[in-house]
Image (cartoon, rainbow, N blue to C red):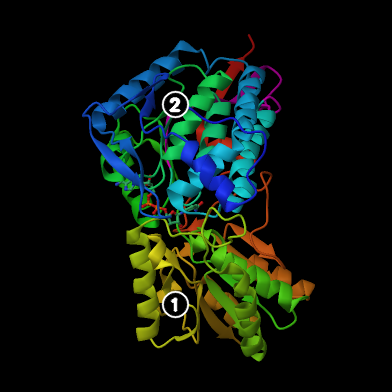
Amino acid sequence: MTHPERATTPTNQAGWQALAGQLTHEGRAYVNGAYQWASNGETFASISPLDGRTLTNVASCDSIDADLAVAAARDAFNSGIWSQLAPAGRKAVLIRFAELIEAHGDELALLETLDMGKPISHARAVDVPASARAIRWTAEAIDKVYGELAATPHNQIGMISREPMGVIAAIVPWNFPMIMAAWKIAPALATGNSVILKPSEKSPLTAIRLAALAEEAGIPSGVFNVLPGYGHIVGRALALHMDVDCLVFTGSTNVAKQLMIYAGQSNMKRVWLEAGGKSPNIVFADAPDLKKAAAEAASAIAFNQGEVCTAGSRLLVEESIRAEFIELIREALKTWRPGHPLDPATTCGAIVDQAQLDRIIEYIGIGQSEGATLVEGGQRVMEDTGGLFVQPTVFDGVNNNMRIASEEIFGPVLSVIGFRTAEEAITIANDSIYGLAAAVWTSNLNTAHRVAKALRAGSVWINHYDGGDMTAPFGGFKQSGNGRDKSLHAFDKYTELKATWLVIE
Ligand code: NAD
């Protein structure tokens, strides 16, 4: 595999296209320190949503590969080469891993864009640095967390410690392939576990590439493995495996529920789930800056083509400003027109694949047949490129019971719902099976806190959308999942709590 060294990041589409022409793509699985094809020899095509071109063939792993990877991960764990390394030792290796991700930033950003369609400027400015930051932040924390001593009688000592679980299977989605992987593998590895990463079949290339960088950073063979393949084949095999101790997942609520069943049918492995969302973005008439609120509402539905678990897909607007606010959003969406993902000026890229595009178009039709008013977008565009593009779309006059308001579309389709009082806004906001995120815009401190407290969501943002950094835990209430990624709380998912009690004779 050759990866071109470049001194500078390309500044235009031609530059990125030239770099893309020089890339070769690794499609093999990475097991026990070596790249290898699936044992059954099967592959699937990794197709770029930019133009329908096949980027490469990827190993389609199955249960035999899962067995091999789990055995390698278990042997590595039992050997102690990583699990018993001092936290400061694991920290040093993981920081090197983060540095290598940064050093290969252009290449990784390009892979992410070619594979899943997001704009190159976002892949380079968001996905690459956020992935490196997740690994570095977590690594820097791991030698600073302590256990506890219980409040014992004088002749006893109660030590409460955390131990790595063993073999972790991490199953991740396609919308932020590298960031979602980093949020899992950073705390899993930092706490001393062995990991098997199962990327989405729609966007496996950066995960496969990360394996080589992990090896270069010094992560020992067997400690980090990558198994590309279909969810219902290799994902299922990992979830049902009797020697996987813990399953961490980001993806849809339906698959998340299935994973809980698999755990119950097998070894009761721990299951931590980050699932879907239908997040309410609540704008009161007294929002401090309506133009800013509209700009962020537009970004909340158009960033990453709306393929974001926390997308602000339900916009709740106080009736007195609804018409004015919709015009502000339509204006703001002018900066989110679909464009070629390799053009650094593009803000809205391609939809990940034909199935997802069909789903979005179907929901736009559903919104119209449900009686909502289409006020912006609604069309597939740039079809002549061979790529998969759709206009950011806004429906007004939406009722929270409509399917476009209750079901996760995972595309740039916004439902605008009017409200008259804070109580009504809270009721509508919480009337959802999901509880991932929510935002409230108001100048009134009391309204802000009253609404924020009442919202049943893992993240609540006041007068902005999608805030937070590595210090903030991230995850959902209700059917948006359990457990938290990021922050020190993430360590809880990857460790068992042990109480060791000593009576002094
Ligand atoms: P998905 O559930 O279809 O797939 C996610 C992963 O699960 C993929 O790797 C897939 O191969 C695997 N999978 C599918 N079926 C499986 C099975 N039977 N057994 C084991 N593994 C299986 O989700 P997606 O379409 O890749 O991603 C979109 C979804 O992810 C959306 O619902 C979105 O809200 C959610 N998401 C949530 C968060 C969050 O943090 N809460 C973040 C990003 C995306």
Q: Amino acid at mark 2?
A: Met
- Toward the left, the furthest residue is 40
Residue 330 or 441: which is nearer the viewer? Answer: 330
Q: Position of residue 156 (x, y in %)?
A: 65, 19
In-front residue for pair 244/205 = 205
Who comes first in sequence, dot 2 or dot 1? 2
* Magenta highlight range: 143-171
Quadrant of the drawing holding the N terminus:
top left
Dot 1 alpha-carbon crowd within 10 angstroms: few under 14, some 14 to 19, many 20 or more? many
Q: Which residue is mark 2?
A: 1
Residue type, label 1: Gly
Is there any visible trace of residue 456 in the rendered image? no
Secondary structure state at the residue bearing disc 2: loop
Q: Is residue 241 left or right of residue 276?
A: left
Q: CA distance from mark 2 to mark 1?
A: 42 Å
Residue 5 is situated, as x and y percent measured from the top left of the image, at 59, 30
Q: Position of residue 15 (x, y in %)?
A: 58, 46
Q: Residue at x 45, y 11 (%)?
A: 79
Local crowd at mark 2 within 10 Å, few (<14), some, or many (≥20)? few
The residue pinned by badge 1 equals 378
**Which image quarter holds the C terminus?**
top right
Q: Is residue 359 above or below residue 34?
A: below
Disc nearest the viewer among 2 and 1: 2
